[in-house]
Amino acid sequence: MSQTVSIRLDEDVFTNLDKLSQITDRSKSWLMGHAVKQYVEHESWQVEAIQKTLAKVEKGTAKFANHEQVSEWMNSWGSANEKKRPSCR
C-alpha cells in the first residue's frame, strides 16, 4: 500500500522534474516515488554495511589497512613506481 507525502522542491528542480515527466510520459508523482525508492535503497545498503563493519570493530574481528600506506599507494597510481596494494591487518 502506498502512502501520500508532500515535499518542497526548489523551483529549478521542479521545472526539471516537469520536463522529465513530459519527456518520459511518467507522472511527477511516479518519478519522485522512483527517485526516493532508489535513494532509500542505496542509503539503507550503505548504513547496513557501516553497521556490520562497526560490529566487527567492537568484536575485534575487523581488518584495516594503514591510512598512510593507502594514501602512498593511491598517490603512486599511474607513476613508474606504482606501489602494491597495502594488506589489511
Image: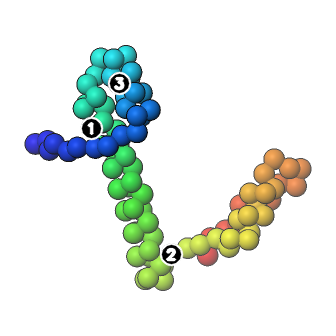
Tally of numbered discs: 3
* Mark 2–mark 1 distance (CA, rounded to whole Å): 37 Å
Disc 1, disc 3: CB below 8 Å?
no
Name the foreground residue: 12 vs 43: 12
Q: Residue at x 55, y 73 (%)?
A: 63
Q: How is the image coloured?
A: rainbow
Helix, strand or loop at mark 1? helix
| Residue 84 visible in rendering | no
Label number found at residue 18 = 3
Name the foreground residue: 50 vs 22: 22
Residue bearing mark 1: 33
Helix, strand or loop at mark 3? helix
Please tell me whether residue 60 is drawn above or below residue 40 in the rendered image: below
| Residue 51 visible in rendering | yes
Q: Residue at x 42, y 57 (%)?
A: 46
Query: Which amino acid is tagged 3?
Result: Asp
Where does residue 29 sit, x and y in percent of width and height? 24, 32
Q: Earlier in the sequence, mark 2 or mark 1?
A: 1
From the viewer's perspective, is the residue at label 1 or at label 3 nearer? 3
Label number found at residue 57 = none
Left or right: where 1 falls relative to 11? left
* Mark 2–mark 3 distance (CA, rounded to whole Å): 47 Å
Q: Residue furthest left?
A: 1
Residue bearing mark 2: 62
Where does residue 11 sit, x and y in percent of width and height? 40, 34
Q: Earlier in the sequence, mark 2 or mark 3?
A: 3
Query: Which amino acid is tagged 1?
Result: Gly
Q: In which quadrant of the rendered image does the C terminus lie?
A: bottom right
* Mark 1–mark 3 distance (CA, rounded to whole Å): 14 Å
Query: Which amino acid is tagged 2?
Result: Ala
Left or right: where 19 falls relative to 87? left
Q: Residue at x 20, y 45 (%)?
A: 5
